[in-house]
Image (tube, rainbow, N blue to C red):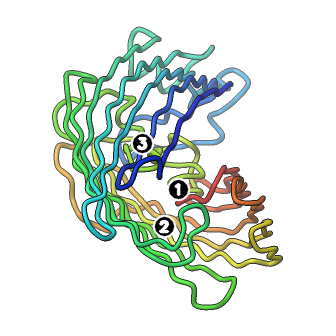
Amino acid sequence: SRHAFVRFRAPQVAEGWRFDAMVKAAREVRFGYFGLGNETEYNEEAVTEAQPFLYRVRRTRYRGVAEVTRHIRGPLMVALMGDVEQARFTSLPGPSVFDADFDPDELKQNDVSGRLALVYDTRDNEYNTHQGLLLEAGTQIGSGGDGYTRLYTLLRAYVMPLEGTVVAARIGASGMGGTPSLDARYTIPGWEREVPVLGGEYSHRALDVGRLAGRHLLFGNLEVRHDLLAFGDLGAITLLAFTDAGRVFEEESFRLTLDDLKVGGGGGVALRILRSSIFTFNFAGGPDGFNFSVGSGWMF
């Protein structure tokens, strides 16, 4: 696997404006594919020497994205993003769930999309938030598949009940119309950073990356961060405790429900270096058993 990108970010180059652009290439040779919908199953004993890649697929993505954000008033902003992407899913040797769902064994998808979002941001700082809100609601139109639309929201809140302790919560929901591509099902085009769906260090730490995928999504995260050793702007060693929950819907309609949520939780350690780098090491248990993940930056 390999990953390379070039990114330009200018949050203060002009008063009232923010600019963000990125060109990216990524190749994930063991990306998880378990099928579509919330009822997909994972049987660890079915992964054998004869079929080691039963739940794996190779995913290659080339992406170019540009976003302009305009300050309206107070903490309110509006953001417009354009995105061009090519994705390719390729079978690995041996039987796999991907082979059973798609024929031929390689799926190529192109997508040109635009996204408009309304953003409300009262965070005390962006790289290591202690207090505030970041509320986002947006709509997206894309050409992937036979064309699709999306409505989504991401709501984040942060409080600091004690010095060195932060309680953070996030709720997210997304609904898609039309006939979205497989690749579009795996991401929410969030402001600042896209959210992978559903599983892994940026959406659900108790699930494998790509564990759940569907047309619609509902999820939530609750996290407590406590600085074990704090060195101000030089960095910190932080303990984590968290609970993640979520589900997807492959059927036509989105439902606001707590039924069949995949719930997991655990703890971890974070290493913050200066004002630029944060690494998280997460240990979680959930419906599929134990899962370990490593993240770059806070989960949210």
Q: Circle 1: is it few (<14), some (14-19), or many (20+) Cα within 10 Å?
A: many
Q: Distance between the residues labelled 3 and 2?
A: 28 Å
Q: Which of 106/171 is in front?
A: 171
Q: Name the residue under label 3.
A: 19
Q: Position of residue 271 (x, y in %)?
A: 77, 61
Judged by depth in the image, the label closer to the viewer, 1 or 3, is 3
Give SS at disc 1: loop
User: Could you say which disc has been placed on residue 221 in the image?
Assistant: 2
Residue at image point 80% right, 66% down = 234
Q: Name the residue under label 1.
A: 204
Q: Going from the N terminus, do you reach mark 1 or mark 2 first?
A: 1
Comparing 36 with 276, the one in front is 276
Q: Where is residue 60 in the image (x, y as percent from the top left)?
A: 53, 20
Amino acid carrying mark 1 in the image? His
Q: How crowded is mark 3: few (under 14 residues within 10 Å), some or many (20 or more)?
A: some
- Dot 3: element: strand
